[in-house]
Image (tube, rainbow, N blue to C red):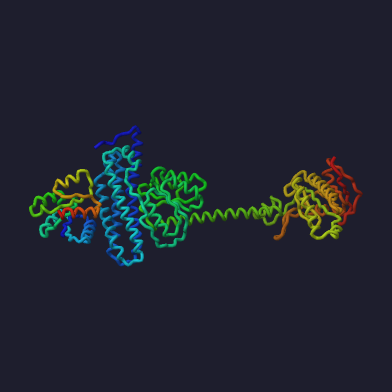
Amino acid sequence: MRILLIEDNELNRDMLTRRLERKGYTVISAVDGLSGLEKDGSEKPELIIMDLSLPVLDGWTAAQQLKADKNTKSIPIIALTAHAMKGDREKALEAGCDEYDTKPVDFERLLGKINQLTNS
Amino acid sequence: MSTTTKSVKTENSSGYYRKILLSNIKHDLTNPINAILGYAELIMDYMQDSNNQKLKADINNIHASGTLILKNINAIFTQGRKHENDNIGELISNPQLQFSIRTPLSAIIGLTELMQEDIPLISSEYREDIQACNKKINHASKQLSQVTTDLIKFSNLSVNEVLERYKTDIYSKEASQRLFDFDPVIAIPAQIGKILIVDDDSSNLELLEQILLKSNHKLLCADTGESALKILQEEQSNVDLILLDLIMPGMNGIELLEKIKLDQHYQNIPIIMLSAVDELDTTAECITLGADDFLFKPINRVLLNARINNALENKFFRDKETHYKEKIKEEQEKSDKLLLNILPGSIAKRLKDGETLIADDIESATVLFADLSGFTQISSTLSAQKLVLLLNNIFSIFDELLEKHSIEKIKTIGDNYMLAGGLPEPSPNHAVSVAEMAMDMLEAISKLDDETAQPLHIRIGINSGPLSAGVIGRKKFIYDLWGDTVNIASRMESYGENNKIHTSENTYLLLKDNYQFEKRPKLDIQGKGIMQTYYLTGRK
């Protein structure tokens, strides 16, 4: 299964990619919102994991655009954030994200959400 | 959101509490990071000779991330300290703070979990040690995550409200467990001692324990000031060094430091403070209060070991020095006592001060010679041992009488006893003192004569006049007297009679007003010619 990981922090991107690959997923990674959308076009992933605080195009806007586009609106999006502000969760869900989690990532919990979103 | 509410306390005290609160919160954030960095460095140590580049890269990244978090925290708290009027709740629940901790922290946790899978596959002999440290990093990271999350709860509170909740420990600290035991690699340092570690944070304590056990130190741990004091009471001077965390709940580091330095039982134990780089002022204060050294967190293993080694070395030297000083004092006292047995106090002092030739002209002194006549006869009837015992007995009685009369004993020659009055310091009543001594000596012999089977007699001769006194020779020297006055005194003794005090004209002239004398017919003294002499018969 292909997962698109949009994360600008290099270490976190590398770490998550390795961990997901070890669990058998194929990971396509992007460093910002814009290239995330472009990547998305060529090889359609089954799931998108996206950090909300991204350069160029921020996560919320990217989420809205993905959900607006008929090609991508069915792809489930898990939003990750390191801000942990009140109202973050609601904002993410409003923008169209299907799931939401805070960093530091609890990997087991993340796997649970991936399973849930791709099996239903 | 609420503005900072002013409590009934003054504005100044609110600022004071704000400062304390910030320190405490920062302390709780940085403790787990110090553990992360500490264990990461241990792993880097273990992996020095390894070829596993991926693993090395991972642990380096963990360390770099930890350092970054620390930097971010420091920056935010420094800013928070500067802007004293900013709402503290906002500061510590600041999204920026959250972000700058959570992002690197996520990397750290993820990397340790990756490493957890990879480490069992490496070929290093330290595999288990590395795995253990890795687990500790993971544990500390999760602790930090929890603390960071808890801070969000403070967002709308005033300083006092935060203080209140902080005191009740709202952080849901996980129970700290030793996840496992392992045998650390032992590096032998130069100095080994018993170290008391005082730190409220259990992960810090554990990290320090692991670092120090490697160096073979014996460790005692306390997580509060009170328990530290208890341990000190039990161990006292067995503790060689104390590592003391500055920030602790309840009794803090400074208070504990003061208490320790006030108690004579442990005030000499060296203390190394563990503090943060922005607590420089408080750390300096600790040094003035008597702490010996300090280290900033995160603790650098190499520096820690170096400072401990230094402190222990100093302490052991000081202990040895004290011991030697005591020994020297003991020996000096012994030798002084011995010397005073041989020489008068003032003469002994002059010798010690470096005078090599002591020869004084004494204007007026009185010299006495006493001879135990008949001793030669006694010696033929008694065994040698019994004879010496008897002589010792008699001379001991005389020795005791010396003090009573402030007389200086000069020497004994066989059964002859020589003393003098009026030296080494002049004294106007020297003749009187010697006269009294002579009469006491007569009485003592008379008593002994009654008590023993042997007939005991004594012949005493006294003369007064000028003489020379001093110490000559380099070996086996004594304080001795020379001159005509001395020779005449000796003659007085040899020309005297049993149990009588034979004096010269000079002595008679000094004593005639207070003592009774019997004039003798003139004597022809060998080497001196005709002399008028007297017997001292009693007091007037």
Q: Position of residue B351 (x, y in %)?
A: 67, 54
In the image, taking residue A51 as reference, residue B425 lies left or right, namely right
**In which quadrant of the rendered image does the C terminus of chain B lie?**
top right
Decide which of B114, B283 is in the foreground and name it: B114
Decide which of B24, B444 is in the foreground and name it: B24
* Residue B460 is at least partly visible in this image: no
Which residue is pictured at 80% across the width and 55% down the height? Answer: B390
| Residue occupying the far front of the picture | A120
Decide which of B368, B73 is in the foreground and name it: B73
Which residue is pictured at 32% across the width and 46% down the height? Answer: B172
In terms of image quadrants, where is residue B168? top left
Q: Position of residue A87 (x, y in %)?
A: 19, 43
| Residue occupying the far right of the picture | B521
In the image, taking residue B16 as reference, residue B421 lies left or right, namely right
Count the marks. Answer: 0
Q: Position of residue A10 (x, y in %)?
A: 22, 57
